[in-house]
Image (spheres, rainbow, N blue to C red):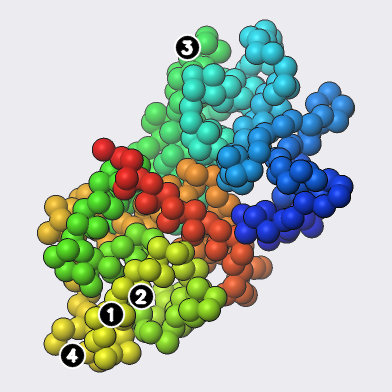
Amino acid sequence: MLDKRGVLPLTDAQIRSLKPGTKRIRRSDGAGLYLDVMPSGRKVFRLAYRYEDKQRTLLFGDYPKTRLADARIMVAQVKSSLRNGIDPQAPESEPEVQSAKITLWKTVAHDYLKLRQQNGAAPRTMVKLDRQIGVTINAVGNQSIENITAQNILDVVNPIAEKGQVENAHEIRSRFSQIFRYAVARGVATHDPAAVTIDAMVKRRRGEFSGVTDPKSVGALMRAIQGYQNQNPVVGAALLLSAYLFPRNSELRGMLWDEIDWEHKIWEIPAGRMKMKRNHLIPLPIQAIEVIKGIQEWNFGSPLVFPSPRDRNRMVSDMTFNSALRRLGYTNDIHVHHGFRTTASTNLNEMGWNADWIERQLAHVPANKVRSSYNKAEYLDGRVEMMQAYADWLDKQSTTAS
């Protein structure tokens, strides 16, 4: 996907393949982030930015110790600092806040973001905060905080919920509330109008598709699935693929061997089995390839990867995967098969991946109807990188969470 200046983002594969020359080689990732490949072979991430009309450069670190995803997160942090009027290279200091400015919503919101950063919020948390609070700033940033009403807040969050992003709408409402409480503590607001808006919003739908989301719980789930493979290798493999690839139940149950492109490491699901009736490409990370090859050893003699034990020309029952999760102790209020999509969406967003890549990987309909012609390969290069990074992240949680 090209950025606003027509720059194609970097990928880890491209960075690894870059060879040093006799002179420094520079490759842009967009948004001011670029990679310098030095004649010595050293690869360095830097950020070009402007502060007080002066061009400046910030060193992020050497690749691969500093990963591409880490560098992008640092870009978001720097941009947040710049919006707060802070030069990221200046010594830390506590700027005086003029009371005339702090009454603007955007000023209070930026101060709150700065406080969260100073209090040690994780980089991926800052990315999420910056994105969600940015929605509030775009909507009411230039209004006095004292004049923002409950209806103003509902006018921001309810259209988001109407697009099907109910959880996101509630989280943005929570950001409004957090900033108002901060403002009350600072003496620039008298109450939190966001507190009364929850009863005028569509209810959260967490109970419909429960899914674990915090890294510790994700790690426990992965370990449970890996252990289940010893009891039922095939269904255990299906649950692993559910975690790595997060397809819908019917999409996975109907997986055919001839849908897998081994050369390009792609699983193409035909339109007839997709909810939105469009062909869908799923990049296969290394872990998923290994799982699928493991299933091949069972040689069911069926075109289906997961055939029914009673009829190898029919897919397994639609209750198979949820039943397995219940046997592992994951009841419907904790984690269901569809919850793997909740797990992936939540953590990929937390990790700072491109929201459009995530939505395409989930096979959601584009909100912008002008773009709804939909190219099944849209953002494929980015999604390949994202899916491998997510699989690696899942593996890390399974070995480090306790």
Circle 2: residue type? Lys
Q: Mark 2 and mark 4 in contact? Answer it, CB < 8 Å.
A: no
Judged from the image, the secondary structure of the residue bearing numbered disc 3 is helix
Cα gap from disc 1 to disc 3, whole angstroms: 63 Å
Q: Mark 1 and mark 2 in contact? Answer it, CB < 8 Å.
A: yes
**Residue under circle 4?**
311
**Residue under circle 2?**
293
Cα gap from disc 2 to disc 4, whole angstroms: 22 Å
Query: For the residues carrying marks 4 and 1, which lies nearer the camera in this image?
Result: 1
Cα gap from disc 4 to disc 1, whole angstroms: 19 Å
**Residue under circle 3?**
185
Judged from the image, the secondary structure of the residue bearing numbered disc 2 is helix
**Is residue 220 placed above or below 233 in the rendered structure?**
above
* Marks 4 and 1, the one that precedes in the sequence: 1
* Marks 2 and 4, the one that precedes in the sequence: 2
Circle 4: residue type? Asp
**Residue under circle 1?**
297
Residue 137 visible in this rendered orientation of the protein: no
Q: Nearer the viewer, residue 120 or 274?
A: 120
Cα gap from disc 3 to disc 2, whole angstroms: 58 Å
Query: For the residues carrying marks 3 and 2, which lies nearer the camera in this image?
Result: 2
Residue drawn at the location 49% of the way across and 19% of the way down: 119
Q: Nearer the viewer, residue 20 or 180?
A: 20
Q: Residue 336 appears at what percent x and percent y?
A: 25, 58
Judged from the image, the secondary structure of the residue bearing numbered disc 4 is loop
